[in-house]
Image (tube, rainbow, N blue to C red):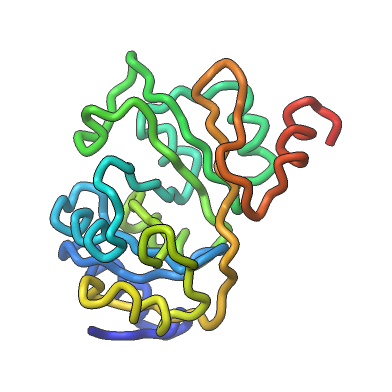
Amino acid sequence: MRTLHVDDEDALGAASKALRAGEVVLVPTDTVYGLAAMPDRAAAVQRIYLAKNRPTHLPLPVLASSLGQVRQLGVEFPTAATILAARWWPGPLTMAFGLSASSTHPEWLTGREEVAVRIPAHDFLLALMRDTGVLVVTSANRHAEPTPLSAGEADAHVAPHVGLVIDAGTLTDVPSTLVNVRGPAAVVEREGAIAGEAIAAALDGSA
């Protein structure tokens, strides 16, 4: 396995090449270290589940580089999502969207009713996804265990399923806040870097 620092000259190209080759890459985000794969590389997606010991009935979240990439997933984009995206994207906000019955979806979303998506505020990751397209990315920890703060520690938790490590030093262990915008009212399903009160204030227009 190879480890590169996020500022290394060839880190971006190496990460893109590894992902396209069907490998899992350990990447930094603006919140925690994550395990990334291209969503249409089924074997790589399965290795993420194995690395985390994650139950297979739990779908993996998706990271995107732009609103355009998010909309290409064929999601329903309600008013609440528009408000929250304007305030916190790019940033530590994940939104669970319903899939539109009238839109075309990528084949790897077949059978899904919703998909959790985020645009991270991380230059390296945004540049990577401008090249690869959206990625499935989930925290680099064993399921239900704390998220490691360093790339080395994270790699030790999920080896040998990772093909490349991108090291950005010490990160946080605070995940993004997850808001489900699929129903008639937005619901905070996991409070993380953004407080639930801030989400509510943005939606009612008081912030």
Where in the figure is residue 160, as x and y percent of width and height? 21, 77
Which quadrant, please, contains the C terminus? top right
Q: Nearer the viewer, residue 59 or 123?
A: 59
Identified at 42% across, 58% down, the residue is 144
Give the side of residue 205 with respect to residue 147, left or right.
right
Residue at image location 34% in from the left, 47% down from the top: 60
Residue 90 visible in the snapshot: no
Numbered circles on residues, count: 0
Q: From what the image shows, is residue 170 above or below residue 146?
A: below
Residue 120: give x, y in percent of width and height.
53, 55
Please, is residue 199 above or below residue 141 in the view? Answer: above
54 to 198, vertically: above or below? below
Residue 5 appears anywhere in the view: yes
**90 and 116: which is toward the camera:** 116
Q: Quadrant of the N terminus?
A: bottom left
Left or right? Give the position of 126 relative to 129: right
In the rendered image, the residue lying farthest to the right is: 206
Q: Position of residue 63 (x, y in %)?
A: 43, 50
Location of residue 96 in the rendering, given as x and y in whole percent from the top left corner: 48, 34
